[in-house]
Image (cartoon, grey):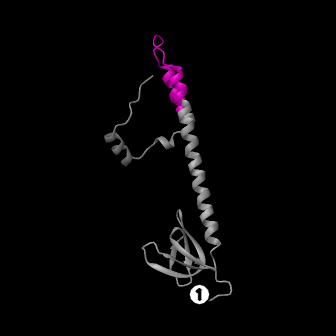
Amino acid sequence: MTHIPALGPADAALRADAPSRFSEMKTEDFIRIIFAELSNQDPFSPNDSGALLDQLNSIRSIESDIKLVSRLDALVFQNQLGAAANLIGKFVDGLTADNQRVSGIVVSVVRHGDSVNLELDNGWQVPINSVETIHDMTGESAP
């Protein structure tokens, strides 16, 4: 079996800028590669099957981790969306995306890609992560 060397610091820097195709690889693709490798190996010097199984388990673990991260990201986004919806009608103070301090009553929730913004009654939008204070307006006037 071919040994894959560990990446050094210089290799890691190059790899950080280059797009990775590893995430596009499915378990079936890996199994096809393994079978191709097994069918082309030297019968007098066979590959280590234990290392092969370790690699397969590593691929499955990585694939499982990628799916878990994706599901957690979706769950976090849904949680932000629900929390933002609960702020409709409340008076909030916060920072806009360009760091301007604004305040107003939340009139709607707006999704911009992966971010959730609160639209205020004065037209400003505040990212949900930039809300600093929340005032319940039940029976009160705005501060």
What residue is disc 1 on? 142
**Towards the viewer: 29 or 99:** 99
Q: Which residues are magenta?
A: 30-55
Q: Quadrant of residue 110?
A: bottom right
Q: Residue at x 65, y 72 (%)?
A: 86
Determine the residue located farthest toward the left in the rendered image: 10
Front residue of this view, candidates 114 and 134: 134
127 or 111: nearer the eye?
127
Position of residue 87 relative to residue 57, above or below, is below
What residue appears at the point 39 percent right and 33 percent down from the top-left corner?
A: 6
Q: Main secondary structure of the magenta part?
A: helix
Q: Residue at x 56, y 40 (%)?
A: 63
Residue at image position (59%, 59%) is 76
Examine the structure image and report whether residue 35 is included in the region drawn in magenta: yes
Residue at the far bottom in the pictured view: 141
Marks counted in the figure total: 1
Which structural element holds mark 1?
A: loop
Q: Position of residue 77 (x, y in %)?
A: 59, 61
Q: Position of residue 60 (x, y in %)?
A: 57, 36
Q: Along the horizontal axis of the image, is 2 left or right of 65?
A: left
Classify residue 74 by image quadrant: bottom right
Give the residue type at disc 1. Ala
Q: Position of residue 92 (x, y in %)?
A: 56, 78
Say which quadrant the C terminus sits in.
bottom right
Where 32 falls versus 88 (above or below)? above
Residue 3 point in image, percent of width and height: 41, 26
Crowding around mark 1 (Cα neighbors within 10 Å: few <14, some 14 to 19, many 20+) is: few
Single out the residue that lies furthest toward the right: 139
